[in-house]
């Protein structure tokens, strides 16, 4: 029986929000693997805000996806065949194989995961790139310490939800910003933040002031734009502003909005620093060990939002920008036998 591999390729560079014509849905036979390579049947693909930047042509921390290439994405799945002693059929592997049902890679570019430790989808979320982003961003860049007040935007999202939980583990006070009453309830009732403020509310500024109780020691920014400016106006002396993302700006058709209240960095002897998780590649083992230990101890909880079917990729991706996802957004691409 011939097995067909379904894929999504980048057909055009989006202007603003990606549309259907920016994608090409293709099929092809399974790739053959060479020496040292591994064939993986993907179960889940990770859908992340960074993907929007990868579609643009221009200088960045990682080369853009080329027109005609399979769309880049983190993946986890089962090894189907291996020409490497590092993997055998039946193992589970984490990689960056893209939006497709099957992919091949050199064994050195894959990471073996143990499905007995946690559901494999968690290795794309809380125990994967989002978790590592939260860990290194808060502990290294943000230098969080006991007694700090930590403000997190996008607090119900894949990264923000973990930032706040780690802040609590470190003895800090976690305040979230999220969109809507349901998300704010999730942030406080399930994740344990001390407070969460709804940026869609007419009372947002008043509620934020009350929740902060005097100011911000660490601001972990996932959204940029107006929210970043509002946070900069409320920082304390020696505050640390961690620039992780700016999802409010990614689909702009006009120039990105920069911070207007940056002078507060001078006034309060504060610093603002951007980072990407790839900066910490050599320390992934450390971060994963910490996250897994906290997860096993019940100190971390994760929520995944799973969209089913590779054909639904274009619409599923847009949920990141509309805020419709509730937790780490994943695309399930393995087909259930009928």
Image (cartoon, helix red, strand yellow):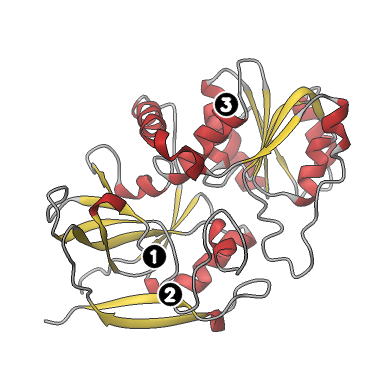
Q: Measured from the top left, where is residue 146 in percent x and y?
A: 61, 15
Which of the two discs, 1 and 3, sits closer to the camera? 1
- The residue positioned 58% from the left and 63% from the top of the image is 52
Q: CA distance from mark 2 to mark 3?
A: 39 Å
- Number of numbered discs present? 3
Residue 192 visible in image: no
Disc 3: which residue: 167
Number of residues whose C-alpha sits closer than 10 Å to that of mark 1, classed few (under 14), some (14–19) or many (20 or more): many
Disc 1: which residue: 98
Between 196 and 23, the residue placed more toward the observer is: 23
Which of the two discs, 1 and 2, sits closer to the camera? 2
Mark drawn on residue 88 = none
Which of the two discs, 2 and 3, sits closer to the camera? 2
Disc 2: which residue: 69
Q: Measured from the top left, where is residue 274 in percent x and y?
A: 65, 41
Q: CA distance from mark 1 to mark 2?
A: 9 Å
Q: Earlier in the sequence, mark 1 or mark 2?
A: 2
Against 176, is 73 above or below? Answer: below
- The residue positioned 87% from the left and 40% from the top of the image is 261
Between 81 and 151, the residue placed more toward the observer is: 81
**312 horizontally vs 89: left or right:** right
Indicate the quadrant containing the C terminus: top left, top right, bottom left or bottom right: bottom left
Residue 76 visible in image: yes
Against 75, is 16 above or below? Answer: below
């Amino acid at each position: 029986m011939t097995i067909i591999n379904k894929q999504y390729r980048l057909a055009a560079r989006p202007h603003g929000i990606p549309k259907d014509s920016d994608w090409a849905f293709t099929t092809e036979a399974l790739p053959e693997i060479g020496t040292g390579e591994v064939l993986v049947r993907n179960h889940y693909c990770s859908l992340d805000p960074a993907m929007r930047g990868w579609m643009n042509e221009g200088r960045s921390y990682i080369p853009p996806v080329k027109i005609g290439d399979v769309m880049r994405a983190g993946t986890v799945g089962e090894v189907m065949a291996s020409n490497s002693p590092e993997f055998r059929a039946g193992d589970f592997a984490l990689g960056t194989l893209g939006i497709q049902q099957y992919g091949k890679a050199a064994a050195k570019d894959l990471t073996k995961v143990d499905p007995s430790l946690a559901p494999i989808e968690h290795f794309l979320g809380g125990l994967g790139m989002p978790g590592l982003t939260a860990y290194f961003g808060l502990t290294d860049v943000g230098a969080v310490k006991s007694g700090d007040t930590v403000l997190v935007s996008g607090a119900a999202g894949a990264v923000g939800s973990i930032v706040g939980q780690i802040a609590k583990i470190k003895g800090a006070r976690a305040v979230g910003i999220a969109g809507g009453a349901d998300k704010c309830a999730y942030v406080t009732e399930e994740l344990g933040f001390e407070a969460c403020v709804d940026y869609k509310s007419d009372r947002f500024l008043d509620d934020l002031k009350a929740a902060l109780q005097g100011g911000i020691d660490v601001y972990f920014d996932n959204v940029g734009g107006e929210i970043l400016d509002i946070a900069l106006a409320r920082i304390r002396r020696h505050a640390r502003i961690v620039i992780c993302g700016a999802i409010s700006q990614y689909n702009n058709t006009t120039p990105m909005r920069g911070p207007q209240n940056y002078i507060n960095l001078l006034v309060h002897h504060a610093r603002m620093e951007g980072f990407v998780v790839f900066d910490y590649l050599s320390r992934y083992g450390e971060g994963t060990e910490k996250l897994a230990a906290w997860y096993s101890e019940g100190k971390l909880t994760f929520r995944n939002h799973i969209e089913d079917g590779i054909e639904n990729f274009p619409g599923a991706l847009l949920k990141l920008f509309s805020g419709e996802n509730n937790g780490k957004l994943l695309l399930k691409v393995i087909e259930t036998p009928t």
